[in-house]
Image (cartoon, rainbow, N blue to C red):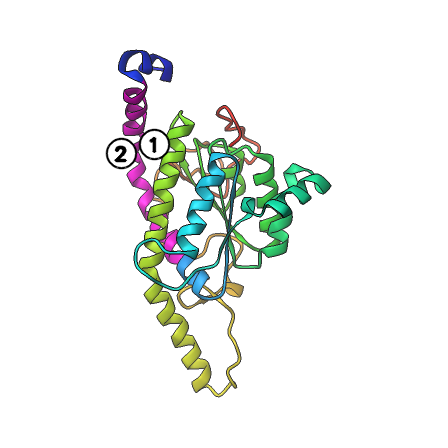
Amino acid sequence: MTTSTRAARAGLLGAHLDLLAEALLPYRAAEPLLARWGTDLAGILVGGGRLLVAGNGGSAAEAQHLTAELVGRLRDDRQPLSAIALHAETSALTAIGNDYGYDEVFARQVRAHGRRGDVLLLMSTSGASGNLLAAVAAAREAGLRCWAFTGPAPNPLAGACHEALAVASPDSQVVQELHLVSTHVLCEYVDRALPTALAALAGQAAAVAAGGHGGAARAPVDAPGRPVADRPDSPADGPSVGDLPAVPAADGPPVRAGVEVVVDGVDPSADGRRGGTA
């Protein structure tokens, strides 16, 4: 049943709530992924790493919401965490767009701000925006870990990133609403993991001091106790996502589900376009 047919039968609000309700139940399967991302991100940020985020249109607003929660706070007071919304730097954005073209507006900033072991998180309902795909290419070349919140998979952005949470709703508004839920839950898991990450960092500092190395700094950690320099270019060690829906096999199509966790192996050329390229 199309959205217009639903609206004719139930009104706009009823039709929208029906679509949201259909997406909510399978969306619960995203929790293990969000928990692991939050734990990893806490270790990266307290270890001196940085989160870069970007999106277009409504997804840009969603991405900026995420950085506000990390630089500010979600609920309880804590240290500020380094998170930058690339689309919010309007002078750089317009200068890069004017000089290099709009597809480069995020990629050039990734090259400027990103360091090996940092995280790039991109948000898109279509997963087909050229400037986001260029940003992923720049990030992977620089050694960043690439995550995405997208709409239905397969789509090019989900295929290009190390991992993606793909919301399988046909309505872009519902996709963005569940991206906002994902943002809040991700930040909750970051806050929950911070004490462990800070303790691990303090333990490393104490070990260096006790070893008589003159306080020589260790590499930042991207999860408690794991230096980023030791992490391969694929997702770091952690709970398996094999029990989550839609982990595509390298030699076959992804399994369909309400929420999809996409890892390396999806064809980046697959066109998941659903209307606009937000």
Q: Which residues are magenta?
A: 12-40
- Looking at the image, which residue is at 69% across and 38% down? 101
* Residue at image mark 2: 25
Spatial separation of the CA atoms under disc 1 and disc 2: 8 Å
In the drawing, what numbered circle is on residue 258?
A: 1
Amino acid type, callout 1? Gly
Where's residue 158, x and y in %? 49, 38
- Looking at the image, which residue is at 50% across and 23% down? 275
Q: Give the main secondary structure of the magenta stretch.
A: helix
Q: Quadrant of residue 93?
A: top right
**Contact between labelled residues 2 and 1, with CB atoms less than 8 Å apart:** yes
Q: Secondary structure at mark 1?
A: loop
Query: Residue 241 versus residue 123: which sits nearer the camera?
Result: 123
Q: Secondary structure at mark 2?
A: helix
Relative placement, left or right, of 175 versus 264 is left
Residue 237 visible, this angle:
no
Amino acid type, callout 2? Leu
Query: Residue 121 versus residue 164: which sits nearer the camera?
Result: 121
The local crowd at label 2, few if under 14, some if 14 to 19, many if 20 or more residues have their Cα within 10 Å, is few
- Looking at the image, which residue is at 37% across and 57% down? 39
